[in-house]
Image (cartoon, helix red, strand yellow):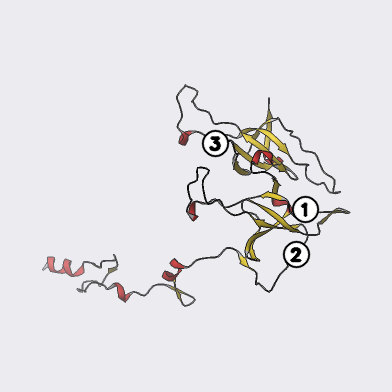
Amino acid sequence: MATSQLTSAASSISAKGFISFEGLRASSAVKVSSFSPLKQNGLSLRSFRGLVVKAATAVAPKYTSLKPLGDRVLVKIKTAEEKTSGGILLPTTAQSKPQAGEVVAVGEGRTVGKNKVDIGVKTGTQVVYSKYAGTEVEFSGSNHLILKEDDIVGILDTDDVKDMKPLNDRVLIKVAEAEEKTAGGLYLTDASKEKPSIGTVVAVGPGPLDEEGNRKPLSVAPGNTVLYSKYAGNDFKGADGSDYIALRASDVMAILS
């Protein structure tokens, strides 16, 4: 009798792992089909699995001109690399998001204090910008980015990041190579090497604007060995395989000598 009651009280489990408790009464297994998926605004949440979210805002073809306002800049995004340097085709998921493009339109500038400050880049200039800056728009059949001038890291006329000319308060640093050994002489694997926060300044921007609209020179100069904040800036790989980082001067914590 006891065995019969325990059997009746047991939970019946379906193939999907749903459990139905019916007290001491025996019950049949719950059918998965009896559960309807959760819904939000009338749509099944299950249907979102195949939903593709388009990040860029599409501008209708009837609009033929896009003029940025204020200190904003319109940049035509450089196409993502489809191959590695060795010629291997990359799948879409492995293609790195571009951080470079060509300036195609600029705003009228901004007012700082009593002075009018024009945009520091011209149309046709090749620029590098912060990774998560701006708003992406699909305009005239191409992907563009509308961003503030301050989000532009530097001007790059070549394909090698070491030739970058930083803008405003940005600093370009060649990252020091990670230590190959521990203090005790043990060799480190690539996975266990700590990311350096030390490097040599390669180039500096003209400095930020003060309240009167004048440039304030930076406190670091090319050739300085500096210690910088560990998680600051944008990382780049040079043509020779060296690591570079572009960050704001405020993220440089000390000069080493």
Residue at the image point whose x is 73% and y is 38% from the top:
204
- Secondary structure under tag 2 reads loop
Q: Work out whether residue 212 or residue 144 is closer to the camera in this orientation and state it.
A: 144
Q: Quadrant of residue 241?
A: top right
Q: CA distance from mark 1 to mark 2?
A: 14 Å
Residue type at mark 3?
Answer: Lys
* Residue 101 in picture, x, y percent from top left: 66, 53
Mark 1–mark 3 Cα distance, whole angstroms, equals 36 Å
* Amino acid type, mark 1: Lys
Dot 3 or dot 2, earlier in sequence: 2
Along the horizontal axis of the image, is 95 left or right of 174?
left
Residue where numbered disc 3 is placed: 195
Q: Residue furthest left?
A: 1
Label 1, on which residue?
A: 122
Q: Residue at x 80, y 47 (%)?
A: 209
Numbered disc 1: secondary structure: loop
- Residue 123 placement, left or right of 16: right
Mark whose residue sits in front, 1 or 2: 1
Q: CA distance from mark 3 to mark 2?
A: 42 Å
Question: Is residue 246 found left or right of 187 in the rendered image?
Answer: right
User: Image point 63% across, 40% down: which residue?
Assistant: 245
Question: Hey, which quadrant is residue 2 in on the image?
Answer: bottom left
Task: Tell me where residue 158 appears, x and y as whole percent.
Answer: 67, 43
Tag 2 residue = 67
**Secondary element type, mark 3:** loop
Looking at the image, the residue that sits furthest to the front is 87
State which quarter of the image contains the C terminus: top right
Q: Residue furthest top?
A: 184
User: Residue 186: where, in percent of width, then height?
Assistant: 45, 24
| Amino acid on which disc 2 is placed | Lys
